[in-house]
Amino acid sequence: MNIDEQSIKHVAKLAKLSFKENEVRQFTEKMGSIIEMVEELNELDTTDVPGTYHGITIDSVMRDDVAQQGTDRELLFKNVKTAKDGMIEVPEMLDNGGEGA
Amino acid sequence: MNLFDYTLEELHRMLVNKEITAETLMEKTFLRIEETEEQIGAFLTLTKDKALEKARAIDKQGIDPTNVLSGIPIGIKDNIITEGVRTTAASKMLEDFIPVYNATVMEKVEAAGMIPVGKMNMDEFAMGGSTENSAFQITRNPWNLNKVPGGSSGGSAATVAAGQVPVSLGSDTGGSIREPAAFTGLVGMKPTYGRVSRYGLIAFGSSFDQIGPFTKTVKDNALVLNAISGQDKKDSTSYAEENVDFTEMLEKGVKGMRIGVPKEYMVEEGTEEGVLKAVKEAIDTFKKMGAIVEEVSLPHSKYGIPAYYIIASSEASSNLQRFDGVRYGFRTENARTLEELYVNTRSEGFGMEVKRRIMLGTFSLSAGFYDAHFKKAAQARTLIRRDFDKVFQEYDLILGPTTTTTAFDIGGKIEDPLAMYLSDILTVPVNLAGVPSISIPCGFSNELPVGMQLIGKHFDEKTIYQAAYAFEQATDFHKKQPTFEGGVK
């Protein structure tokens, strides 16, 4: 399938990325050839073939349900850019009632 | 003293016999780094003071004669989290990130008495095959400074090949240990998925990522895997087998061993002549040593690249959502709202290749394309895994070239992402199947090293090392050294 600039902009929005107009053009072209390549898979007959979603087949391992000491709160804040009263400070969530995060 | 000239066991013997101290070894390591780093560019961060301090502490304690790794310098790929030491994954997004905890492998490195000397350059978030996608610098191949060292673990490969450190750790999602090992004439192991804990490895494709060692020799490699492998409570996909000794079978030889060579890996079209020639000669060497080498087929190999790029990019698009400018890492200065904070942080912080993978992954998972892309790729992955299972019913190992060419020119593929992706054609099927694979030097083409891949059954790294060791003992490719200017000595 061909991918157009409109679809690229839509996917960028989903991925929370933005591109300049000239980047969108370049991207559309290069993504187009990559998507063409991955669509070679269409020639494969995968009727009744289950998907593989893990590196190896092992059962999920659960640890015992015992409370443990977590990471120190102060340490977790070490890489935060701006904090206030023990909370991370970010810009306002809503822009005049527009769409939020 | 040049670190080139010694194996880990030899360095250990010198430490035990007090011919050198751990401190002297470390000083010499940094001397070599200072002499060569301007040309190679392997390191993003050096931790000289910490390293010398640890070396002195080990000298004070005395070298443990039963622990061959005690006091050995090691380079760490910069996507492995190191407490108190800047960890960037070669991304502007993490340029000033100083982790507050250690990856499990770092705890293990420490417990083994190895001493980290710094953090190695790589393709940003491990996405790439040349290390040119680093946000900070390129790394040059010690065999020819105009060539790439491969990627994404290019810094980890170049530092060992240049004789700066005797061992380093890399990570392999689609070939990122084996391809650079092949390009720089080293031994590089991608262990079975689950063999080494991924806790603290900055996630790219979580169902593929594995950490593994780069070394000059096979035995060195097995010794390091001994130290870093094992089950970890912090990684639920880590495998429950403790205290495995990967050196156990080294001396057993390959007589009667059954090795399959996939016809899909030995195609003349698209493969450098010198690469095929070196691998064919390696096959003859194995036959002479008594191995039974026969042609086999992995019929779905050609679907490896599309399946891998869909699944790995999908996993990456999900994993990289965490980089939003809030809790750590880069934050845009250009945001009035939270939405702008997310979008502008990500758009300014990620490089082009990372954005491309996030876009491909988001696209493959999005409404309307999930079935045709992600689900189809997961089904193709099953077919590829079954190909391997079938061959392994009759054969102990699979052998083939690691890459279709030797190291390419710096700048040669960076403008053409598709060409760069296609260079992973021989390495990604292994990650899709989750099996272990090593790349070892098997010759030269145009004075550049050629790598041969030995692929094993799930959790059977021992047989891989056994065959790799036998080949190494029968040849002298691992003893050749790079001249930096091109040419072999």
Image: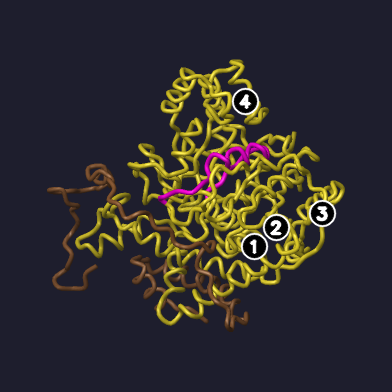
Chain colours: A brown, B yellow
Please give the range of residues in magenta: B211-234
Task: Locate residue B466 relative to residue A22 in the image: left or right.
Answer: right
Label 3 to label 2: alpha-carbon separation: 13 Å
Circles 2, 1 touching at the beta carbon (< 8 Å): yes
Residue for badge 3:
B280
Amino acid type at image mark 4: Leu
Q: Nearer the viewer, mark 4 or mark 3?
A: 4
Q: Nearer the viewer, mark 2 or mark 4?
A: 4
Q: Which of pointers 4 and 1 lies earlier in the amino acid sequence?
A: 4
Q: Nearer the viewer, mark 4 or mark 1?
A: 4
Badge number at residue B11: 4
* SS of the residue under disc 3: helix
Give the vertical position of B105 relative to B332 (above or below).
above
Q: Let me know if residue B228 is in the magenta part.
A: yes
Badge number at residue B1: none
Badge number at residue B404: 2
Label 2 to label 4: alpha-carbon separation: 35 Å
Q: Chain of mark 4?
A: B
Q: Chain of mark 3?
A: B
Residue for badge 1:
B425
Q: Let me know if residue B304 is in the magenta part.
A: no
